[in-house]
Amino acid sequence: MKNLLDQNFEGKKVIVRVDFNVPLDEKFNVVDGSRIKAALPTINKLLNDKARVILMSHLGRPKGKEDKFSLRHVVNYLQELLGVSVSFSNDCIGPSAKKAVRKLNNGEVLILENLRFYKQEKLADEGFAKQLSDLADVYVNDAFGAAHRNHASTSTIASFFPSEKYFGLLLKNEVDSLEKALSSPQKPLTAVIGGAKISGKIDVITSLLEKVDSLIIGGGMAYTFAKAIGGKTGTSLVEEDRVDLASFIIHKSTELGVKLLLPVDSINANGFNNDADIKISNILNIQDSYMGLDIGEESVCLFSKEIENSKTIIWNGPMGVFEMSNFENGTKKIGEAICKSTANGAFSLVGGGDSVAAIKKFNLEDKVSYISTGGGAMLEYLEGKELPGVKAILK
Ligand code: AMP
């Protein structure tokens, strides 16, 4: 596979699948442009080469052509970031897209209208992908956030560029970091999994069990494990239909020689709010009418020690309801332990919407090795699945 950085694309029409699916306010201003900023290294590389850069993306979940989901809303934002003029085509295929591309000079940028205005995008339609491909000489995929989707612009289109298809710099970084953490990790490898429920992460947990030395479980899902080992869980978030599954994971980890660490103590509240009455207890002995909303100090110490002895750490999901100040401590302390381990030479990979939000809330984002931008794509990668967007470039 050819590397984008080894090529010069002067004068070439390069179509780049980016992930500009950003939140907009009611006046259609970009609220959080992190995803746009994440694509800048690739765009700047192409601009420095004096390529003609054609950007395509989806935005939201439009039902047909809905102006509130128009990519026109991000043009000014990108223009300010790049400092070059950015043009816009109000269709992503057809005569107007072709005309906009013809007008594009070397070193200029064009954004195409939302790909999902056509239902063919999500259907991975070949004819639609062919029309997109007709606009360019080279295809680059830099949309890690959409790499787990088998769509026309993320997957089908690659076949029309048998030798001129590349990973963008963001996508390459994501894949390299995940590979580093999973395929050839420095040992010991520890996964820290938290969040609300086991049900959403069961495939991740079972796949990781085959790879990790230690598995730390926190967050809401820990209470289903507590129930599985005969604990009294009060009104905590227990998934009754997953108790057997939790028992199976406990059994499997012993069989595989994986050290499974569950919280030992729990911060409990008599309501799901920050002003509720708080009681601390052993996680196996939570008072009736109280629910566990965070891990306690003993668990923090236990988990931190394990993290600090690890050489590779994967973190997905908070340890408690970190959005509320009274239940943020566990997540904050575990985040800090991961940063400390990173400072001592470990490689740490953080991903999944809520863990990234937590890392940002506690200002730790510069202290971990890598923050993944694609929650869904990262989870599927951790589940051991092949990502269609990655496969299409490699084959
Ligand atoms: P997920 O999207 O599955 O990673 O879940 C993240 C959410 O889990 C966050 O919004 C947390 O507030 C929530 N969460 C973490 N710990 C608990 C808990 N003990 N009880 C209820 N919700 C929790």
Image (spheres, rainbow, N blue to C red):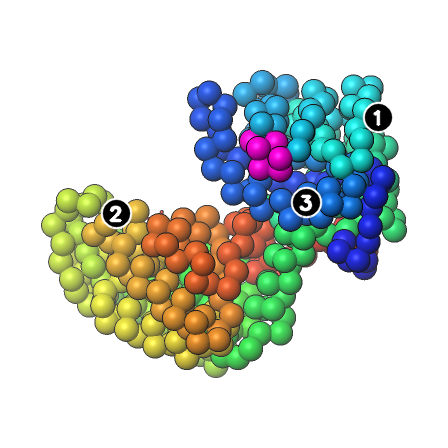
Q: Residue at x 15, y 44 (%)?
A: 275
Question: Label 1 vs label 2: CA separation?
Answer: 53 Å
**Where the N terminus falls, by quadrant?**
bottom right
Place residue 94 in its image quadrant.
Answer: top right
Q: Tell whether 320 sits left or right of 31.
A: left
| Residue 78 forms part of the magenta stretch | yes
Disc 2 marks which residue?
Answer: 324
Give the residue type that dot 2 points to.
Met
**N-terminal of the two: label 1 or label 3?**
3
77 or 197, which lies in front? 77
Q: How many marks?
A: 3
Q: Which residue is drawn at 51% across and 64% down?
A: 369
Q: Tell whether 353 sits left or right of 56.
A: left
Give the label, 3 or 2, closer to the camera: 3
* Label 2: which secondary element: loop
Question: Label 3 vs label 2: CA separation?
Answer: 40 Å
267 or 14, which lies in front? 14
- Asked whether residue 355 appears in the rendered view, the answer is no
Task: Decide: is 78 above or below 218.
Answer: above
Disc 3 marks which residue?
Answer: 44
| Residue 393 forms part of the magenta stretch | no
Q: Tell whether 121 sits left or right of 227.
A: right
The magenta segment is 77-83
Question: Are the residues flagged by discs 3 and 2 in contact, CB closer than 8 Å?
Answer: no
Residue 102: mark: 1
Q: Residue at x 31, y 59 (%)?
A: 332
**Residue 137 in picture, x, y percent from top left:** 86, 40
160 or 19, which lies in front? 19
